[in-house]
Image: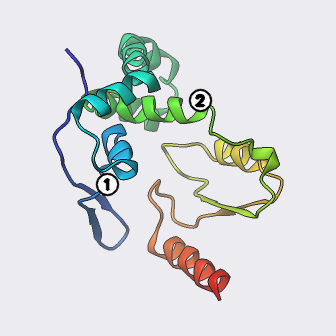
Amino acid sequence: MNSLSLKGRSSTRRNQTKEIASPDFDDTLIGDIRVGRPDADEQDVLEAARLAGVDEIVARFAGAAERMAEVFAGSPAVLASLPGLAAHGWRGPAREVRLQTRPWGFVPGEVAQPVRLWHAPADQEVPFPAAEATAALFPAARLTEQGAPDHIPSEETLGELFAELRAASL
């Protein structure tokens, strides 16, 4: 039995002051595939998941749950997140592993354009050194410390991002 859910759903992300609902993108592999290929049928989605190795990665996470609890015993925030990650089938961490370990289709060190990254030093889900390491891959990267401690960008960060995009398009 395949562990992918093919039901469409919308995602709601809580920002500091309001909820943002996105009916067209649900932040899953299925959503990723359908953003790029809205006409993808069930077989296309299952084949893309198989090629991406997501089921294998999920199985490894599920098999290592007890060990992760031991490893992260000294990190209350990470330890507290493990039951939620398990309840969602380990899809979030599997997606991150896939993104970080598979070829991106380009060499970051060869990107000449400026790259701008925002990250919160107090992010409980992704450590700040991970953002610093990602920024170091790009020769023209600028990493900005996001003021809000949440994993999801704050209204202030989004405002800054859109202001820069508007200024760049003038």
Provide residue 36's location: percent of width, then percent of height. 40, 50
Q: Position of residue 67 (x, y in %)?
A: 45, 12
Instruction: Determine whether the residue tagged by mark 1 lies in a helix, strand or loop.
Output: loop
Q: Which mark is residue 25?
A: 1
Q: Position of residue 123 (x, y in %)?
A: 52, 50
Give the side of residue 118 with respect to residue 37, left or right. Answer: right
Q: Residue 137, can we see it?
A: no
Q: Nearer the viewer, residue 83 or 162?
A: 162
Name the residue type under label 2: Arg
Q: Position of residue 161 (x, y in %)?
A: 57, 73
In the image, residue 87 sits, relative to residue 114, either above or below, namely above
Q: Quarter holding the C terminus?
A: bottom right
Q: Looking at the picture, which amino acid does disc 1 mark? A: Phe
* Placement of 94 over or under 38, stated as above or below: above
Rendered image quadrant of residue 42: top left
Q: What residue occupies the far bottom of the structure in this picture?
A: 170
Query: Few, some or many C-alpha atoms within 10 Å of disc 2 (few <14, some 14-19, many ≥20)?
Result: few
Q: Quadrant of the N terminus?
A: top left
For this view, does 27 lie left or right of residue 153? left
Choose the circle earlier in sequence order: 1 or 2: 1
Quadrant of residue 53 in the image?
A: top left
Give me the disc on residue 92: none
Which residue is drawn at the image coordinates 18% and 49% (left, top)? 9
Identify the element where label 2 is drawn.
loop
Q: Is residue 159 left or right of residue 105?
A: left
Looking at the image, residue 139 sits to the left or right of residue 170; the answer is right
The residue at the point 36 percent across, 31 percent down is 91
Residue for badge 2: 102
Tell me if mark 1 has few (under 14), some (14-19) or many (20+) residues whose alpha carbon lies within 10 angstroms of its own. Answer: some
**Along the line of sight, the residue nearer the viewer: 119 or 24:** 24
- What is the spatial separation of the Cα atoms under label 1 and label 2, in whole angstroms? 22 Å
Can residue 104 be spotted in the picture? yes
